[in-house]
Amino acid sequence: MLQDIKGMVSDIIYRNLENNYTVFEILCDDEVFTAVGVVPDIVIGEKVKVYGEFYVHPVYGQQLKVSYLEKLLPETKDEIYLYLSSGVIKGIGQKTAKRIVEMFGDDTMRILQEEPEKLLAVRGMTPEKVERIKNMFSFQKFLKDIMTIFSQYGLSQNHAMRLFKLYGFSALGLLYDNPYFLLDVFPELDFKKVDRLAFDLGVSPDDMRRISAKIVNLLNMGSNNEGHTCLPKEKLILFVSKALEQDTEKVEEALDSLIKAKRVVIDTVDGLEMVFLYGFFECERYIAEKIASMLKEYDDILDIDERISEFEKKNSIVFSQNQKKAIKMALTQGVSVITGGPGTGKTTIIKCIIEIFEQEGKKVFLCAPTGRAAKRMQQQCEKEAKTIHRLLEMTVTDSQVFFQKGPNNPLRCDVIIVDEMSMVDSYIMYYLLSATKDTTRLVLVGDKDQLPSVGAGNILKDLIRSDVVPYVRLTEVYRQSEDSFIVLNAHRINNGEFPYLQKNSDFYFIQKNSQEEILKTIVELVTKKLPNYLSADPLTDIQVLCPSKKGVVGMYNINRVLQQYLNPKDGSKKEVVYKENTFRVGDKVMQIKNNYSLEFTIIEGEEKGKVSTGIFNGDIGVIKDIDRAGGAMEIVFDDDKLVFYDFSLLDDLELSYAMTVHKSQGSEFRCIVMPVVETYPILMTRNLLYTAVTRAKELVVLVGKKSALEYMIANQKEAMRYSALYDFLKRKLKDTQLQAL
């Protein structure tokens, strides 16, 4: 329940100067309250009115989580003096404050707000100080006015302050002119809340701004939540029409206006009219054009068969004809795709390709979409591999992401090999290609049967589906010891067959019927049985993978339960409670959103002491320390990256004793444990199970109902993901062929 407290700021315990997250104390009727939240700059001695909800922290007691803070102006001479001398206005100290109050008395606050120029008569005042006073009171008025609006619709003061940083005092005018512009600035906002605000500001239900905003909102939701780069025009129009209770003619009219404004594009894909956000259309169109320009055949490497034979002899292996075909393709084609499941020899093929290229004096770059995938690629290929972001030399300026490598500063290499291509989305592919010369050979490696990228697009499958880019699919399994069932069963699952189960193997299924039994079994496995069986660390070697986030055996609950066993509450361990999570020193955590500007320091290895930026979605770390007073914690992420993690960023952090299968892509663990239960059909698919099983290096343990496992293996349905790259590629090839006639 929202409550309000009126009082004086008595202490500021912590403040983040970048985003204004503040921990402070309020003195109210001789009682002191601790408040936390994103608030405008405050100083000790200021009178404020704070709106928020109380909650009880298990360590620090009752606290007020601030939704909105309103600054109250002082009234008496003494209050005005304390206010001015507190440092609230830079450059005005105790002496100047005293002179101002002595000159203007009880009229001081009116002078400050309405006639600040009169302050120039006070000794020590300058035009610069007067200008600061004008700006300060203008900002306070702006914040009060906008929060009077925002607070009624569940919009936060954090949004209001971010809006001011972007648009200054013009933000209110923009809001009144078109309330829906908030959705352009903050796509994560609930459309219904903004819609209610717009109605109250006089926007009519059939206003073109409203209908246009809903169209863009659905396209944004489609890309962010489901990975679509476009949506069918007919379905989109009907959905908007129904959601807003407007005629389809009105929706088409709004769509036309968005096209004229170059905010959306309509194009025909496979005979179906599709609607794109302008950025995604340009992105996929460019990828198709760039790929087409790189599609050429090279004959500069001689005696390829002999080179392959030399590699076979040196490494005591024999490639199959299909594997040799993949190697030859990569050596002779401008762009090539190699796809295959675990154990099909992708890594050995990459090593052979690298060796032959380097024998020819060609410079080869290796990269992958995530830090873990790049690290594994480097270990397996014994050659430096980078994340795509690092390869492109990502930098952050004023929270904006830039890549140093691009069309005007391309990557200086002859060959780029990209691993884990199933995880590469449209935008990162666009930036990679824009930094790649047309004469550079591109070798794309991945498993098309794994889950698609988290970001929008369907790059790997579209490249294969187009039949424009040369590709080889590896199907024969080679990496498999006689007593290993992991690789064998991964392929059986992918072929729709039930896995082989055998005692004392590396692939187990434990039958349990109730979710409570499944949870109990998983806890016993992770905390006792498996650490002993494998001589394993439950934090680093064993990973629980969950199809879903919610429920008894969902990710959230398993994390809470495993935390109690693996890192229980202890008076000597520091902790912080944030929403439903308790973060404690020693906890295993995961970053769930890309943060390009988050600074880290390398604390081990050759690059020890190096400072850089960027912690990404899926990065795993361990909490090393928590500074309650400083409002931050120390986390060591993958690759020895030490981050001072501000409490204001905790929405982007989760416990990771358990994680979703989607988040595990690109990673490998010694052992994976997975609950198998009935849940939403979209989360009980063959490729989700296949992706989970292929994360394990030494042991797979599935716990649950046999009927649920059988359903997953049989369920080939994958969530529809709309994209257009394959169609653009086919069109581009056709255009090229026509031009050649």
Image (spheres, helix red, strand yellow):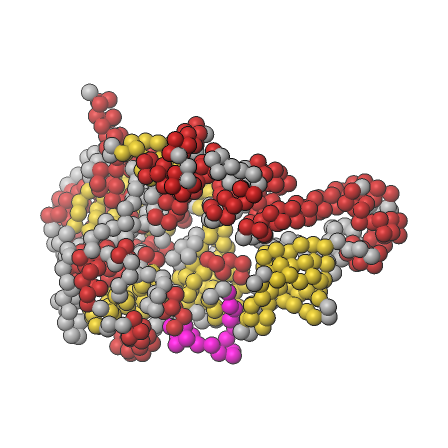
Q: Nearer the viewer, residue 104 or 314?
A: 104
Magenta stretch: give its range: 562-578
* Up/down of 39 relative to 244, above or below: below
Seen from this angle, which residue lies furthest left? 321
Would you say residue 444 is visible in this rendering?
Answer: no
The count of marks equals 0
Q: Residue shown at 26%/65% (left/top)?
A: 677
Foreground residue, 144 or 672?
A: 144
Magenta-drawn stretch contains 305: no
Q: Residue 55: x percent and y percent?
A: 56, 68
The image quarter containing residue 12 is bottom right
Q: Where is residue 50 in the image (x, y as percent from the top left)?
A: 65, 59
Q: Where is residue 428 in the image (x, y as percent from the top left)?
A: 37, 44
Do we see residue 2 in this rendering?
yes
Which of the pair 731/212 is nearer the observer? 212
The answer to whether 494 appears left or right of 604 in the picture is left
Instruction: Name the residue: 15% across, 55% down.
Output: 495
Question: Which quarter shows the C terminus?
Answer: top left
Residue under the image location 68 percent in, 48 percent down:
140
Looking at the image, which residue is at 58% across and 66% down? 54
Along the horizontal axis of the image, is 362 left or right of 741?
A: right
Looking at this view, name the residue that lies furthest to the right.
103
Q: Quadrant of the N terminus?
A: bottom right
